[in-house]
Image (cartoon, grey):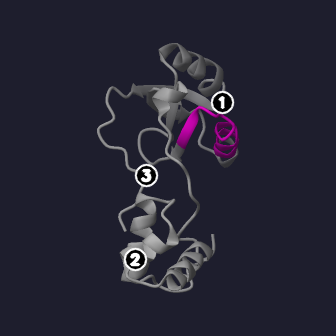
Amino acid sequence: MSEPSREIDRTDRAILRQLQADGRIAVTELAERVHLSPTATAERMKRLTRDGYILGYTARLDPRLLDRAMLVFVEVKLDRTTPDVFESFARAIRQSPDVLECHMVAGGFDYLVKARLADMDAYRRFLSTTLLALPGVRETHTYAVMEEVKEAAGLPV
């Protein structure tokens, strides 16, 4: 991602809000909503992409329909906190298709992993064959999500 070439204005922010709500919106509809011409809107979108504000477009999928109904968060503690262990862990965790997110955190543990699986049996397999097999993992604590109260992919703009 490149450094932004300039600060974004209120219109750029309006474009970003609209695109977060509907990434498939037609440029003409977007232009109407932000009170610009389609050409000016398309140019701003190109600049926002070039400057790294827009990273890409994705579709939101229903995990229940794709056999991924179970959401878990897992705290991971490593046996050593050295650069080589961090790098080995990160490289290995990126290979797991079950892991949606993984964040190195400050506090009582080293990583917070967010994963989606079919059910508890699938989670047990994931824990034993993936997580506990990762380089340097000493201990894990799992939190199975009972209800997703709020899930927002968008950023406040």
**Residue 77 position within the rendered picture, expressed as x and y whole percent measured from the top left:** 52, 34
Circle 3: element type = loop
Q: Is residue 54 above or below residue 82?
A: below
Relative to 154, 147 lies left or right: left
Q: Residue at x 55, y 17 (%)?
A: 122
Magenta-highlighted residues: 86-101
Report the amino acid beneath label 2: Glu
Q: Residue 155 lies in magenta, yes or no? A: no
Closer to the chain start, of discs 3 and 1, is 1
> Residue pushed farthest top?
121
Closer to the chain start, of discs 3 and 2, is 2
Report the amino acid beneath label 1: Leu
- Judging by the rendered image, the residue that carries numbered circle 1 is 134
Q: Residue at x 38, y 50 (%)?
A: 152
Measured in 3D between alpha carbons, the distance from the residue under mark 3 to the one under mark 1, in whole angstroms, is: 28 Å
- Judging by the rendered image, the residue that carries numbered circle 3 is 153
Relative to 29, 100 lies left or right: right
Q: Nearer the viewer, residue 56 or 30?
A: 30
**Residue 15 position within the rendered picture, expressed as x and y whole percent measured from the top left:** 43, 73
Specify the label residue 32 is tagged with. Answer: 2
Circle 2: element type = helix
Graded by Cα atoms within 10 Å as few (under 14), some (14 to 19) or many (20 or more), the crowding at tag 2 reads few
